[in-house]
Amino acid sequence: MTLEPAASAVLEKALRRAWPGPGTPEPRRVAIRPRGGAASGDAPPNSRRSLSGEAVVEFEAGPPLHLFVKGLRSHPAGSPSMGGGEREAAAYRLLEGCSQVPSLHRHWRDPADGRDWLLLDHVSGRPLSASDSGERWDEAADLLASIHARFAGSGARLADSVLPDWSDPAWGRSFARTIGPTEAVVEGAPALDLDHAWRRAVSTLRAQPSTLVHGECFPGHVLVLPSGGVRLVDWEDAGWGAAAIDLEALLWGAPAALRRRVLARYAARAGAGGRRAADARALRAAALANRIRFLASWGPSLGDTQAADLLAEIASLLADD
């Protein structure tokens, strides 16, 4: 059963209610295309935590506007994911003026259901993970280095309490509870103390300089534009933490030669902070933290093979530390 018409109606209603204020012309016509699985299924769209889609907004005069409409409910307390619409909006406000992230046009919270709605520039591109161009990976390294350097020690952390500390030691307990005994996740998995593993990882990460981090900087969130260049999207898991968190996520599963290339490029562009982020010990700690959180966030939807691989990687990282 498809719910695309219902999802389109929800998205258009949100867009019109959140439309930029006085002085902005009212839309004459809005065409919505819901995005992915959030727009289909057996549950009503409003029951889902997130809903998004592309919107083409036409006016009586002037060119149409191509937007991305995104609605997010906050995660419940103790959730393994820290993301949400308020946090994503806060990140975009901090990044205002950066041409390599989407511009935020409006953030609005629906008092009826608490969902945060964001109106963003639409970015059309293919994921960096599908690119074999070394130049595009260089551009991704440059973008990360630029953002991390811009916010390192800037004091922005104190000015914006909406964005949390990505390497909070207390999250380990919530992650461990969410995952449960690791030996029960999949047959033959090793018994691991994930709370202890998380605390080991963040003790290293907290010794690193803190900056603005994307939080899920996987290659799928870096889009390569048809005209060239890259954009970093989906900032709902942004927070303050060690730059290595983003750098390691970008390189998760990358071939050794590409990994060496990106690390060298990043270190050269980010200066002293970049060299610390590219340090092997910091990257190992970030790899451990990223995998624990990924398993806690996506565990129920993972197949046995992927879950077993993640647990084996966690065990290997603990053994190497």
Image: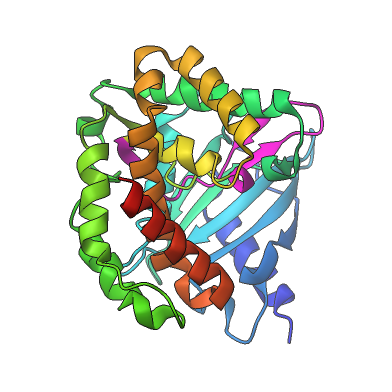
Q: Does 229 appear in magenta?
A: yes
Residue 35: give x, y in percent of width and height: 68, 61
* 81 left or right, relative to 43: left
Q: Nearer the viewer, residue 90 or 225?
A: 225
Q: Nearer the viewer, residue 136 or 192?
A: 192
Residue 257: give x, y in percent of width and height: 64, 30
Magenta residue span: 219-241
**Picture quarter containing residue 36?**
bottom right
Quarter holding the N terminus is bottom right
Q: In this view of the protein, can residue 99 be seen by the observer?
A: no
At a point 72% along the width and 74% down the height, the residue shown is: 4
Tally of numbered discs: 0
Q: Is residue 25 above or below residue 311?
A: above
Q: Is residue 35 above or below residue 282?
A: below
Q: Is residue 166 above or below residue 296?
A: above
At a point 66% along the width and 30% down the height, the residue shown is: 230
At a point 52% along the width and 25% down the height, the residue shown is: 263
Residue 117: give x, y in percent of width and height: 49, 55
Quarter holding the C terminus is top left
Q: Nearer the viewer, residue 54 or 108?
A: 54
Q: Does 153 appear in magenta?
A: no
Q: Nearer the viewer, residue 44 or 137?
A: 137
Q: How is the image coloured?
A: rainbow
* 262 left or right, relative to 178: right
**Picture quarter containing residue 239?**
top left
